[in-house]
């Protein structure tokens, strides 16, 4: 526990130097509240460690040295935070530029046509040879049912059956694609 004379000595030290120390700290910190906090911490640090000093120590110089180091630590911390914030801003800027470039290069028609073609090819592979040939003749070569029936020596009803089988496979394969396409159209 501190004696009354020690408390008076502390109060006198604080009253005599607090304003000078705050002005010194504020010269570098440029924030009066932070400067006052640093000065109080510096004086408290001295007070807690005063027994370790020699009797001929220059107390104001010692406290100012402590305040100087606390100011340096504070400013280094600010610089590190600013560097990190700058790196984050630069990273966001690069990511945003990449997104812009990617979006500008994006051709939805090409994306959908490539994806749709892949799905159609997969669906065609699922069909029997005859069903696939009939579907290709109908949809890609624009042949009529009677022309296809004549080519395969089938009835038009058989051609209709193969086309309906092929369309069922196509619908199953393209179901997610059609929903996505409708979403973009709407």
Image (cartoon, helix red, strand yellow):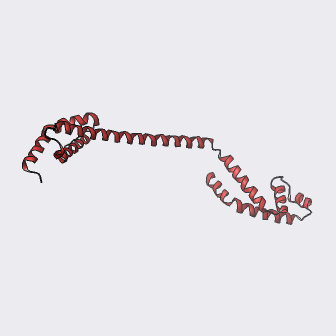
Instruction: Provide residue 94's location: percent of width, then percent of height.
Output: 52, 40
Q: Quadrant of residue 102?
A: top right
Instruction: Provide residue 181's location: percent of width, then percent of height.
Output: 65, 54
Question: Who's the residue at 24% across and 42% down the image?
Answer: 38
Q: Is residue 136 left or right of residue 6?
A: right
Number of numbered discs on residues: 0
Instruction: Provide residue 129's location: percent of width, then percent of height.
Output: 84, 61
Q: Is residue 93 left or right of residue 45?
A: right
Whether residue 31 is situated above or below residue 108 in the rendered picture: above
Say if residue 186 shows up in the picture: no
Question: Who's the residue at 69% across and 46% down the image?
Answer: 110
Taking depth in this image into account, of 186 and 49 the one nearest to the observer is 49
Say if residue 153 shows up in the picture: yes
Taking depth in this image into account, of 88 and 129 the one nearest to the observer is 88
Question: Who's the residue at 10% across and 41% down the image?
Answer: 12
Q: Quadrant of residue 161?
A: bottom right
Quadrant where the N terminus lies?
bottom left
Q: Is residue 177 left or right of residue 101?
A: right
Taking depth in this image into account, of 94 and 58 the one nearest to the observer is 58
Q: Quadrant of residue 29?
A: top left
Q: Is residue 60 left or right of residue 153?
A: left
Taking depth in this image into account, of 37 and 155 the one nearest to the observer is 37
Instruction: Provide residue 150's location: percent of width, then percent of height.
Output: 92, 60
């Amino acid at each position: 526990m501190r004696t009354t004379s020690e408390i008076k000595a502390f109060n006198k030290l604080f009253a005599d130097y607090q304003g000078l120390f705050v002005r010194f700290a504020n010269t570098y910190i440029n924030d009066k509240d932070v400067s006052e906090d640093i000065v109080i911490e510096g004086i408290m640090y001295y007070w807690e460690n005063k027994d370790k000093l020699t009797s001929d120590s220059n107390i104001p110089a010692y406290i100012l040295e402590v305040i100087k180091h606390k100011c340096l630590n504070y400013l280094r911390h600010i610089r590190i935070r600013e560097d990190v914030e700058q790196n984050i801003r630069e990273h966001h800027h690069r990511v945003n530029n990449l997104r812009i470039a990617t979006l500008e290069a994006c051709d939805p028609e090409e994306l959908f046509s490539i994806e749709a073609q892949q799905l159609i090819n997969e669906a065609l592979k699922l069909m029997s040879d005859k069903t696939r040939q009939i579907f290709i003749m109908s949809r890609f070569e624009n042949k009529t049912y009677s022309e296809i029936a004549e080519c395969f020596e089938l009835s038009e009803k058989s051609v209709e059956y193969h086309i309906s089988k092929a369309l069922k496979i196509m619908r199953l394969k393209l179901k997610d694609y059609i929903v996505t396409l409708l979403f973009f159209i709407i």
